[in-house]
Structure formats: C-alpha cells, structure tokens
Image (cartoon, helix red, strand yellow):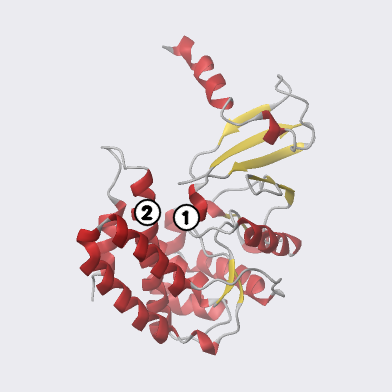
Amino acid sequence: MAEDLPHARERESDLIPDQALAHVPGWAGRSSEVSLARLKGGGVNSSWLVETRAGRFVVRLHSPMAGLLGVDHEREARLHAAAAAAGLAPRLVHVDPQHRLLITEHVDGPSWQPEDFGREDRLRDLAARLRLLHELPAPAVAPFDLPALLERHAERLRQACPQDRVLLDRLMDRAGHAARECRSDLREQAIVHNDLYHANVVGTGPALRLLDWEYAAVADPLFDLACILAYYPQAAPHAAALLEAAGLAERADLDMLARASWLFVLASYFWERLRRLAEPAGPREPDVGHALLRRLQEP
C-alpha cells in the first residue's frame, strides 16, 4: 500500500495544468527543485502551494460554479489589490485575464482556528485590521446587493426544489425585515472581505493578513462583523467589543448586528444548498444545511 502513495501524489499533481504553473515566478517545469502540494479546504475551487527558487506561492484554480454562487473575479482582483497595497492581504502575482486562476504570494504564519473566535483579544485584533480595511478608498467595482443576491439564490432553489417554496418564501420575507432593520444607510460603504472563515485569517496584530477575497465587495462594513458572528456563534458574547474595535459602535448597535448576522446565516444556507445541488454530500459528510436551517428558525 505504501508503495502506491508516490504514484497517487503524482496523479494528483497532474490536476494543476502547466499553463497555470507557467505564471509562477521561478517555475522552470516539474522537477525535483520544485515543491508542489495541494492545499486543504476550498469548497468550490482548488488551491496549490508551489515553492520555487523565487519563493512560495499559492495558485488557485477557479471552478465555473463560483459564478453561480455570486463570485465576481474582476471585483475580487481589484479589491484584493487594494487590500494588499495596505498590507492586509498577500501580494497578487498573477491575475488571469479570463479569471480562470489567481496566483498570490504565500503568507507564512499560523492560520486561525475556530476557538480563536471565542477570544476577545483575538477578535479585537481582527476588528482593528477590519477597521483599516474599511477606511481604505474603495475602487470602482461592480455593485454588491446582498438582498438581491439572496433573492437570486432563493429563486434558483424554488425552481430546483418546488416542495420548499413555502419555506423559502418565509425565509425571504424575514430577510426583507432583517435588511431594513440593519440600517445600512447609517454607514458609508467600504471594502469588505465578506468571508472571514478561520482559514482565511493568518497571524495576529499588525501582522494579521486576510486570504481568499472571492466574496469581497464594497458594501456595509457591518457585514464583516456579521460574517464573523454567522460563522462562529462563539463570538457573540464579544459582539460589543467587535463593534468598538472596528470603529462602528456609534453607527450600529447590537440589534443591527444581530439582524445582519442572520442574513449571513441565510446566505450560508442558500450557498450550501446550491452547492449540494451540483455536488451531493457524501454519506459521511455532516449535514451543514440542516444545522444552518435550525439557526435560521430560532426566535
């Protein structure tokens, strides 16, 4: 069995085409001088760590399904570049004009773990970096409308799963109320990361960097804090500290943040269901969709 492992690794490495690797600095073909390893994670795309004499780089290959889930790679590239210039994201190395792939420098340092989102000191670090992000001049990019995106997702699900139409209509009715109660009109739009999953956060303090800007947008800065609470309920006891450290305490209250967080849970639920329409879960995979639905139905 052990003798088969090198061959399995070679077959997996063939999944990344040479045309993509040709844009990596220092790439001179597949050789013993080059390290190539697939990175874990990524629900839609596939990413690779490539090490050459020029350094360490991450190559992300884009799945066509990303566009169906609301991704705009042109917008991503512009906002990632703005964040990288401010030291908040890894440097962009290559942006494919057809947006089939993206190459960045690799960021050294420990990725966050879910338990970090239960620590106030860590959350204040993250919120302080988000405050810097939200203060950056926003480049001109395609608009982002979360309620409209939710409605598009809901309509796709209505068509694919007509038996769930009543549930979807009820969720979207509540989404309309939540969107109004967020009072986004009280805050100027800003660059938001919009996907603060723990593996996308590396380091602490001034060295903290944010990875994977696929869902970045120019939108209500409260959405970034809402994303944290939606992904990691253990952060909820520190919601007031998050608002303060992010500089939003005077323009948003805990109720507005809770409504925005509910919208992000809904977005996650729709995203998971749409993904599973294309890629059904395996028998041993957790039923994430049902867990998210239970949260949405809480009072």
Looking at the rendered structure, the secondary structure element under dot 1 is helix
Provide the residue designation for mark 1. 68
Which residue is at the front of the view, 161 or 32? Answer: 161
Percent of width and height locating residue 116 = 47, 58
Percent of width and height locating residue 211 = 60, 54
Q: Is residue 293 visible?
A: yes
Provide the residue designation for mark 2. 274
- State how far apart marks 1 and 2 are (Cα): 9 Å
Q: Residue furthest front?
A: 159
- Identify the residue shown where x is 24% and y is 60%: 162
- The amino acid marked with disc number 2 is Leu
Kindly indicate whether the residue at mark 2 contacts the one at mark 1 (C-beta within 8 angstroms). yes
Which residue is at the front of the view, 49 or 263? Answer: 263
Q: Is residue 208 left or right of residue 226?
A: right
Graded by Cα atoms within 10 Å as few (under 14), some (14 to 19) or many (20 or more), the crowding at tag 1 reads: some
Q: Is residue 70 left or right of residue 281?
A: right
- The amino acid marked with disc number 1 is Leu
